[in-house]
Image: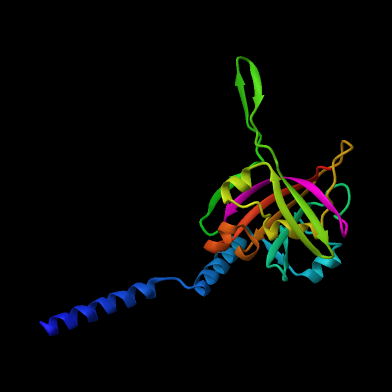
Amino acid sequence: MKKTYSLLILLCGILLLASCNKGETYSDLKDAEREAINKYISKNSIKVINETQFASQDETTSLTNNEYVYLSKSGVYMQIVRKGCGSKVKDGESLEILCRFSEYNIKKDELLLRNDVPYYVMISNVTYDYSSAPDKMTVERIGNSYTGTFVSGSTMYNHHGSAAVPAGWLVPLNYVNVGRPQNDDDEVAKVRLIVPHSQGTVDASSSVYPCYYEITYERDN
């Protein structure tokens, strides 16, 4: 009886050890994230440039060559589609910015959110605009640091349950202008980003997955 009991305990121990071995460590998850980012870059024929080359190009990225600059401090990859009208956020300035965006989980190859697609419905020969409102965030710059909070437009908040703006969203503000179009040829800033979990949403941070974003920035005040 004692022998049988001992064997059962040993078997349970082996099963428990096997179960633990199947679990992924944080290091494993980060390795998987890095692999997913590298595959995404390769699949989409992205040419990664360093910050030195980026600076020599007047802080621009070639759309023709599908260039993204790798920003080593944040780990974010950024392509500037449009620099935008207006000016950069000034040191000590606080402002409200309207954002249209799409959010894509690179690891799962899945579109998560978007509020950048017009949605119109015709009822009794009348066209109604049901497009989502842009997400509005309040942003403050102190030195080279930015903080942001979503204050209206519920797309990000409703999905992720946090009013905190992901750090990765604030990185481009060092390089693009945030204005409000006044003339026919004025355009708002637009970027494409590959954002690691450490610079992403609360969900990305907790589950360790990278996201691809397309975001526009427009001054609201």
Residue 196 place in picture, x, y as percent: 62, 64
Write the residue at 65% across / 41% down. 115
Of 95 and 208, nearer the camera is 95
Q: Which corner quadrant holds the C terminus?
A: top right
Of 74 and 32, nearer the camera is 74
Horizontal placement of 180 versus 113: left or right?
Answer: right
Q: Can residue 74 be seen in this view?
A: yes
Horizontal placement of 77 versus 36: left or right?
Answer: right
Residue 111 place in picture, x, y as percent: 56, 48
What residue range appears in magenta? 90-105
Residue 41 part of the magenta-drawn span: no
Residue 104 place in picture, x, y as percent: 59, 52
Q: Is residue 51 above or below residue 94?
A: below
Q: Can residue 65 be seen in this view?
A: no
Of 45 and 70, nearer the camera is 70
Horizontal placement of 132 versus 109: left or right?
Answer: right
- Magenta: main secondary structure equals strand
The extreme left residue here reads: 1
- Dividing the picture into quadrants, the one containing residue 45 is bottom right
The extreme top residue here reads: 124
Q: Which corner quadrant holds the N terminus?
A: bottom left
Write the residue at 71% across / 57% down. 66
Write the residue at 63% across / 30% down. 130
